[in-house]
Amino acid sequence: MSQVFDADSDANEEYLYHVVCHDCPTESVSERASDAEERVDEHRSSTGHDIEVAQLPNERSA
Ligand SMILES: [Zn+2]
């Protein structure tokens, strides 16, 4: 019983979402794809910057 599956969260424990902008120092890490996509959309629409999200393995779950 060492693993708990949290049905109340849409976070995927296996991955982190790394948001990084190529045009300014904006950078953040989110556990939720929806959060990361929201930040990308917001930043892109307000600045026109080239920002993207990369999926990374979540080392904490190893
Ligand atoms: Zn930017």
Image (cartoon, rainbow, N blue to C red):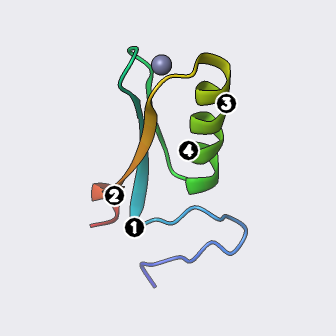
Q: Secondary structure at mark 4?
A: helix
The residues tagged by marks 1 and 4 sit, at their Cα atoms, a distance apart of 15 Å
The residues tagged by marks 3 and 4 sit, at their Cα atoms, a distance apart of 10 Å
52 left or right, relative to 34? left
Choose between 13 and 54: the one closer to the eye: 54
* Callout 4 amino acid: Ala
Circle nearer the viewer, 3 or 4: 3
Circle nearer the viewer, 3 or 2: 3
Q: What residue is pinned by disc 4?
A: 36
Q: What residue is pinned by disc 3?
A: 42
Residue 58's label in the rendered image is: 2
Q: Position of residue 48 (x, y in %)?
A: 57, 22
| Label 2 close to label 4 by CB (< 8 Å) | no
Q: Position of residue 37 (x, y in %)?
A: 59, 46
Look at the numbered disc 3 and say if its residue's Cβ is closer than 8 Å to ligand 1: no
| Label 3 close to label 4 by CB (< 8 Å) | no
| Label 1 close to label 4 by CB (< 8 Å) | no
- Image quadrant in which you'd find residue 18: top left
The residue under the point 46% across, 65% down is 13
